[in-house]
Image (cartoon, rainbow, N blue to C red):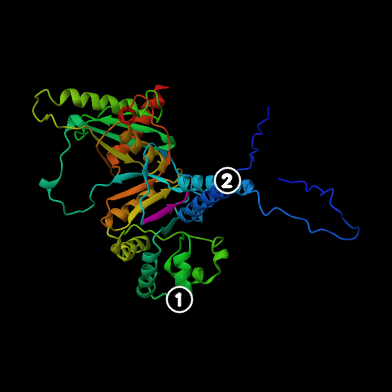
Amino acid sequence: MSKHKLPRKSTHIDMTAMCDVAFLLLTFFMLATKFKPDEPVVVKTPSSTSDIILPDNSILLTVDAKGQVFFDYDNKKAKKALINTVSQEKGLNLTEEEKAAFVNGASFGLPFNQMKQYLSIPPMEQKSYAFTGIPVDTSYVAATNELGYWIQAARTAGQDEGHPPRICIKCDASTVYPKVKDVIKTLTKNNIDRFNLLTSLEAVPEGTDLFKERSKQ
Amino acid sequence: MAEIQEKSGGGKQRPGVKKGKKLSTRIDLTPMVDLGFLLITFFIFTTTMSKPKTMEINMPVDKPDIEEKDKNKVKDYTAMTVLLSKQNRVYYYTGLADDPMNPPKVEVTYFQSKNGIRDAIIALKKRVYEERGNGMPGHNIKDEPVILIKPDTTSQYDDIVNILDEMNINGITTYALVDITDVDRDFIKKTEEANLSAQ
């Protein structure tokens, strides 16, 4: 009787295909990821049960605990148009480099007369700039209220996206109401009656109407 | 994996002549795959986490020239006013309180899960839903509870978010964030004094 020899198969698996897939996915996620932008101030947002995701093309107004207002806009194209308008109308005489620094820069909070100085310093040092916040006064009209002017100008600049930019307020939980009210009044006086408040997510309390509604789904 | 190159025995080999080692051209890709998936996991987590959540708010139109007939009238039995004050205190009363001779009963509470403002809102909703169909003059089956939120200057932003969140949680569709009046400030003051003397 002759013994049949079993063919010896290698236990090695060809990893090349798996590696391809892994790196394809990796490339996809790397390109799709938007990192959190740098923030000039630390803001601890209050929590709510609301789970609406922040829409694209939105203006983010950060209000810190002292009530200083910072402005940011996630649409770079509109930001470019915005700084051109601001530079011209407010006579800031910004150079092309300074405009580019504005477009690529993070959230800022300064009156107009400090803009040129702020934009001319290198990007790494911009983070540590002593911000004073965008001036908000109680006249609430775009002519004298600088925040109102920024919002009006940004809405005009972001118009061609199909819908005007959405305004989102990111405010610290301990900010006193009068400061928040000034920002909200500035919006409503500029005919912006719908906006978003940025909050962190918390669980819906059991037994409430919203809880019943959500558990139905 | 490290493979041991066996010495080829048997063959005649003269001393001094080195044979070129045959190295495998295969590279083990397992660590590379590991790394790839590790990075993927990292990117997946960062993408989903960075999209912030928001709550939407609609403010009443702020125009001085709205005509009297275009204004929505709040009915007395559906109305409730919530006053936000210092140290996360919440004062509330039902009704419009437009009769100075007959001031409303102002209660004080906090944002707590038991006997807090939520229970007051739920009670209001229940009462309005019971009363709206009873055929009394001015009552309409479509009536909804209306809540006016009036933050005092001493209140903080998280009070506002909390009370707006309560609207959302309890399914209150009609509410408005409006300015506080001196009458309301007076209510807070009187309630505080009454509570102090009761102690």
Q: Nearer the viewer, residue B86 or B138?
A: B138
Q: Nearer the viewer, residue A83 or B137?
A: A83
Point 32% across, 57% down: residue: A165
Point 35% across, 49% down: residue: A181
Q: Is residue B179 magenta?
A: no
Q: Which residues are magenta?
A: A58-65
Asked if disc 2 and disc 1 are in contact, CB closer than 8 Å, the reply is: no
Amino acid residing under circle 1 = Glu
Q: Which residue is mark 2?
A: B38
The image quarter containing residue B171 is top left
Please tell me whether residue B38 is drawn above or below residue B20 in the rendered image.
Answer: above
Please tell me whether residue A62 is drawn above or below residue A202 in the rendered image.
Answer: below
Q: Nearer the viewer, residue A171 or B6?
A: B6
Q: Quadrant of the C terminus of chain A?
A: top left
Q: CA distance from mark 2 to mark 1?
A: 41 Å
What is the number of the mark on residue A120? none
Secondary structure at badge 1 equals helix
Q: Is residue B12 left or right of residue B114?
A: right
Q: Give coordinates of residue B85: x percent, y percent.
A: 38, 37
Please tell me whether residue B68 is drawn above or below residue A90 in the rendered image.
Answer: above
Amino acid residing under circle 2 = Leu
Tally of numbered discs: 2
Secondary structure at badge 2 equals helix
Q: Are marks 2 and 1 on the same chain?
A: no
Sort mark 1 into few (<14), some (14-19) or many (20+) by Cα contacts within 10 Å: few
